[in-house]
Image: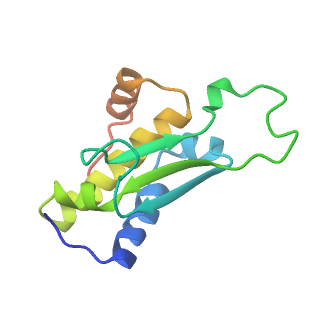
Amino acid sequence: MFACENEKFDAYVVEAYNKLPKPFLKKIDNVEVVVEELSDGFGGSGLLGLYSGVPLSHRNTAYGMFPIPPDIIRLFKYNICRIVNSEFELKSKIFEVLYHEIGHYFGMNEEQIRKSMQEFKLEMFE
C-alpha cells in the first residue's frame, strides 16, 4: 500500500484529467470528479472508481432543458492506494481508473474502453 496525502492525491487526479485525450475533454459536459476515501456503500473494497449518471450516448434533446445535477465520477482513494506501491504506480492507476470511468460516461462498455485505451496508446505518467 502506498500512503498519499489527500492534497497530493487530488493533484494527481487533476493531472490525470488534464492528460485525457483532447477529443474526450472537448465533449465532457456536466460531470463532476470526486475523490472518496472509501467505497463503502458503493460495491465493496475492490471498487476503484464508479460512474453515476446519464451516459452521453443516452442523452436526447430533452437533456438539459431543466436543471440536471452533474454526473459523478468517484475515485476511491483507499482502494487505489491499497493496490499500488509507488508514486509512479499511483499516478498511473489514477489515470487508468479515471479514463475507464470517463469511458462509461461516453457509453462505452468494458471491451470498448480497453480498445480505446489501446488505440490512444496511452502512456504511463513520467
| Percent of width and height locating residue 93 | 27, 52
Q: Residue at x 39, y 35 (%)?
A: 120
| Percent of width and height locating residue 20 | 46, 49
Q: Residue at x 54, y 27 (%)?
A: 107
Instruction: Report which quarter residue 78 is drawn in.
Output: bottom left
- The residue most toward the right is 65
Q: Residue at x 64, y 41 (%)?
A: 27
State how many labels appear. Answer: 0
- Viewer-nearest residue: 35 or 27: 35
In this view, 42 is above or below 15: above
In this view, 117 is above or below 22: above
- Figure quadrant of the C terminus: bottom left
| Percent of width and height locating residue 25 | 58, 47
Left or right of 81, for residue 67? right
Can residue 103 be seen at all in this image of the molecule?
Answer: yes
Can residue 125 be seen at all in this image of the molecule?
Answer: no
Q: Residue at x 40, y 45 (%)?
A: 42
In this view, 104 is above or below 7: above
In this view, 78 is above or below 103: below
| Percent of width and height locating residue 9 | 35, 69
